[in-house]
Image: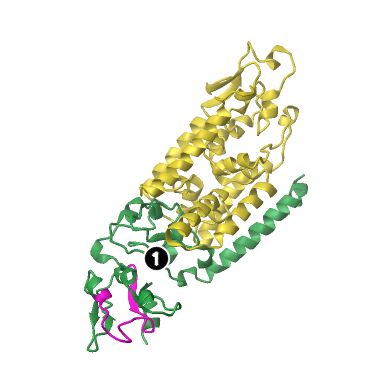
Chain colours: A yellow, B green
């Protein structure tokens, strides 16, 4: 696999760069497409509970996000989220937990932390009167930093966020390595659909070529997976945890990992 | 198991971090963050409702072709940081109302151009050149609403009822260039509604 240019890893990088370029282009050309925060389902839920009102745009975004969640599960986490982009740029390992054997073990309340954060931020917004989680959301801070730079260059107004926002993002990335799995309410929103019904697009292993399914030991896919999911033996949690980053498809020496509609249905 | 995760180092860090942050921001919110006023884009809701709805998506900042809408810095307070505010340092609002169209959450609602009330212009008498020597009439000439008039001694005065706070006077005011002192600011500035009284002495 070494030296291969077309990998899903590089494709993800290209998607991120294109999203970033679209943000810069939109700012230069006055398109007003905004940052991801305009379409964020967690932000919409918080605004709805803080202001007790919804606009048509928010409703449409929420429905679109729910459809994306049903189709692709947590795909946003690896294909669109700037935090996972930053993690990759700074080489912060994404590993969450399980080795293949551990998957069946009950993990206590841990899998529910992110949902609790989602519920708590919606409730907290109601009491505080403004979207609370956005204050420490690394995505919000990332875009806040970019627009602080914009303000610095366009109207020559520097601000403390030029120093503080990167520091908070760094603290969140380096101290809370499990942020994405256990804290992020946006991820929780996309995961929730996977809990209700498995996303339509998922990974699986080809019976003919997968080493594990043919009785040999391999598990390269599980080792390369940030969530520790093994393509041939997906644990029950895989439906909601898989971010469709397709690292496993990149790494599989036999090309046995399949991704698609209802792939590897059991 | 549960206790072990609750008392682990990271969760302690998270909790202290979160608690400090929410106490800090929450206290500010409860002690009336609505009392601190900013110049909001035209059509913005009252401060409290604005903060409840703004998702800091920066759409209005992007779409403003005069580049007068900018995110507020952290010094404006925790809940307000990153929300859009108007500053007339190098431009003014031409009421194109594009910020109204793009706002996704209704923090900026559609209004007629005539209803616009971004703020009110006030004369800073120490900085205004015409209040010292008379002769400068830039703001009087630039005001599209004829809300700045000269009094008997040819000094500019604001007619508050006519002013919509578009900031054309502030953007054009030549006072900083005309005065040698580096401290001197603009002779006419736009301030949020309710604060204009502090400048009338």
Q: Is residue B136 magenta?
A: yes
Name the side, left or right, on which B66 lies relative to B47. left
| Quadrant assignment, res A250 | top right
Residue B81 percent location from the top left of the image:
50, 61
Residue B105 percent location from the top left of the image:
40, 52
Rendered view: A9 above or below B82: above
Specify the segment rendered in magenta.
B118-140
- Magenta stretch secondary structure, dominant: loop
Residue B193 showing in the rendered view: no
Q: Which residue is mark 1?
A: B87
At 60% across and 32% down in the image, what residue appears?
A242
At 62% across and 30% down in the image, what residue appears?
A238
| Quadrant assignment, res A39 | top left
Q: Quarter holding the C terminus of chain A?
A: top right
Q: Nearer the viewer, residue A233 or A29?
A: A29
> Residue under mark 1: which chain is it in?
B
Q: Nearer the viewer, residue B60 or B66?
A: B66
């Amino acid at each position: 696999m070494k030296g291969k240019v077309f990998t899903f890893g590089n494709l993800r990088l290209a998607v991120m760069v294109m999203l970033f370029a679209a943000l810069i282009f939109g700012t230069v050309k006055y398109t007003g497409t905004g940052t991801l925060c305009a379409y964020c389902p967690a932000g919409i839920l918080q605004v709805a509970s803080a202001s007790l009102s919804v606009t048509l745009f928010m409703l449409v975004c929420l429905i679109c996000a729910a459809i994306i969640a049903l189709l692709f599960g947590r795909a946003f986490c690896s294909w669109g989220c700037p935090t996972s982009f930053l993690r990759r740029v700074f080489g912060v390992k994404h590993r969450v937990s399980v080795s293949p054997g551990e998957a069946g073990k009950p993990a206590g309340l841990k899998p529910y932390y992110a949902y609790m954060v989602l519920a708590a931020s919606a409730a907290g917004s109601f009491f505080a009167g403004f979207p609370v989680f956005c204050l420490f959301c690394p995505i919000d801070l990332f875009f806040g930093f970019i627009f602080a730079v914009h303000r610095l260059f366009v109207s020559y107004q520097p601000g403390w966020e030029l120093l503080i926002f990167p520091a908070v993002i760094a603290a969140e990335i380096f101290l809370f390595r499990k942020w994405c799995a256990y804290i992020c309410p946006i991820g929780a929103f996309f995961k929730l659909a996977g809990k209700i019904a498995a996303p339509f697009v998922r990974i699986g292993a080809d019976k003919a070529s997968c080493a594990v399914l043919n009785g040999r030991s391999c598990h390269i896919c599980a080792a390369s997976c940030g969530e520790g999911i093994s393509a041939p033996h997906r644990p029950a949690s895989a439906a909601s945890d898989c971010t469709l980053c397709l690292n496993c498809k990149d790494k599989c020496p036999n090309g046995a990992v399949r991704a698609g509609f209802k792939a590897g249905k059991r | 198991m549960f206790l072990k995760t609750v008392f682990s180092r990271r969760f302690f860090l998270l909790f202290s971090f979160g608690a400090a942050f929410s106490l800090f921001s929450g206290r500010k919110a409860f002690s009336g963050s609505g009392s601190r006023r900013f110049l909001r884009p035209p059509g913005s809701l009252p401060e409290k409702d604005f903060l409840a709805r703004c998702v800091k998506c920066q759409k209005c900042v992007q779409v403003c072709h005069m580049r007068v809408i900018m995110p507020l810095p952290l010094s404006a307070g925790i809940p307000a940081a990153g929300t859009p505010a108007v500053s007339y340092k190098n431009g003014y609002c031409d009421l194109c109302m594009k910020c109204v169209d793009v706002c996704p959450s209704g923090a900026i609602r559609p209004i007629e151009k005539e209803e616009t009330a971004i703020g009110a212009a006030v004369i800073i008498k120490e900085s205004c050149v015409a209040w010292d020597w008379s002769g400068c009439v830039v703001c009087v000439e630039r005001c599209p609403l004829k809300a700045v008039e000269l009094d008997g001694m040819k000094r500019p005065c604001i007619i508050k009822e006519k002013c919509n706070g578009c900031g054309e006077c502030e953007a054009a005011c030549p006072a900083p260039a005309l005065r040698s002192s580096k401290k001197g600011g603009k002779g006419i500035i736009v301030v949020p509604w309710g604060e204009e009284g502090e400048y009338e002495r």
